[in-house]
Amino acid sequence: MYLYHYGFRKLPFSLTPDTELFCALPSHKSALNTLKFALSTGEAFCKITGEVGSGKTMLCRLLINKIGEQRQVAYIPNPVLTPRELKLSLAHELNMRLGKSVGEEQLVPKIQRKLIDINKKRGPVILIIDEAQSMPDETLEALRLFTNLETESNKLMQIVLFAQPELDSKLSQPHLRQLRQRIVFSHKLFPLTYSQTKAYLNHRIAKVSVERNITLSNTAQWLLHKASRGIPRLINILTHKSLMLAYGANKRSIGLSQVWHAVLDTDDTRIYATRLKAALAVIGLSVFSSSALALWIMP
């Protein structure tokens, strides 16, 4: 009924990273271009960092979709692993059948032979690691050693790290300088600006709309941007809740009221409610009617 009410094919603001709904905003598009160039030139390491909810997993899925047909991809979404567990996870991603008792002296040579075989057919394997900031230091060092595996002309494996900014702090440690120096290309995702937030909202709604019969007021979009701090995941959460509230009231337009209640219903944004209320009060005299302002500064 929710989808029918708005004329949607599917949820436009689900937290699932649906690549069909990807909005090619400047920072994310630049990140994809950086990855494509790094992989096409054979670099061993590249890195994408961004705050929680900035869209790293979406980029990760896009990258897998775009290169998966041409290249062998290994994907490790949870890298809180020991060096041995990392090697076993890689072997599993490469469809290698290894007994649990395989010795360390056999493990790396077996992986190397598999990488050489794949390289002859499809080029270097691309290892994608999500949440790389969670990797223990010794596992990061084991990861670096994988880049020593190469033929006379190219690396056997290229590694893409998606991580929160904490990875940069970790890599600044002296004992990880060898890995840090091998990262030739990197890109940082930035929060969306107000104009980008508006473009993001309109893009997602347009993508799923069978018949566009929903509107978001300018003030609602402004509050969505301010409350979310330009973080795509929070934009999704707040907009989804705002749509649910409007649906419950049998409306097809999203205004300040729906967004404000969504802000108060979300842990990550509720803590900024006092600051947002003050901002609304400051601009209210010139933007809102007295009745609207009274509504928004209510406790």
Image: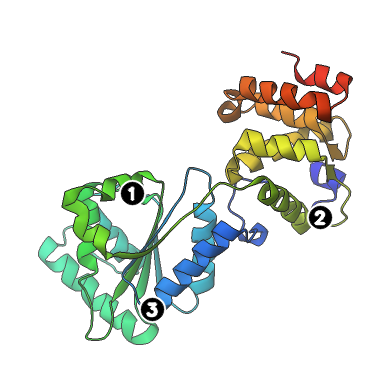
Callout 2, which amino acid? Ser
- Mark 3 or mark 1, which has the lower sequence index? 3
Query: Which mark is on residue 168?
Result: 1
SS at mark 1? helix
Query: Which residue position is annotated with label 3?
Result: 41
Rounded to the nearest angstrom, the CA distance separating label 3 from label 1 is: 23 Å
Residue found at x 48% / y 42%: 52
- Mark 2 or mark 3, which has the lower sequence index? 3
**263 on left or right of 153:** right
Quadrant of the rendering where the N terminus is positioned: top right
Residue found at x 73% / y 27%: 260
**187 on left or right of 141:** right
| Residue 91: x %, y % from top left | 29, 65
Query: Which mark is on residue 209?
Result: 2
**200 on left or right of 148:** right
Above or below 92: residue 169: above
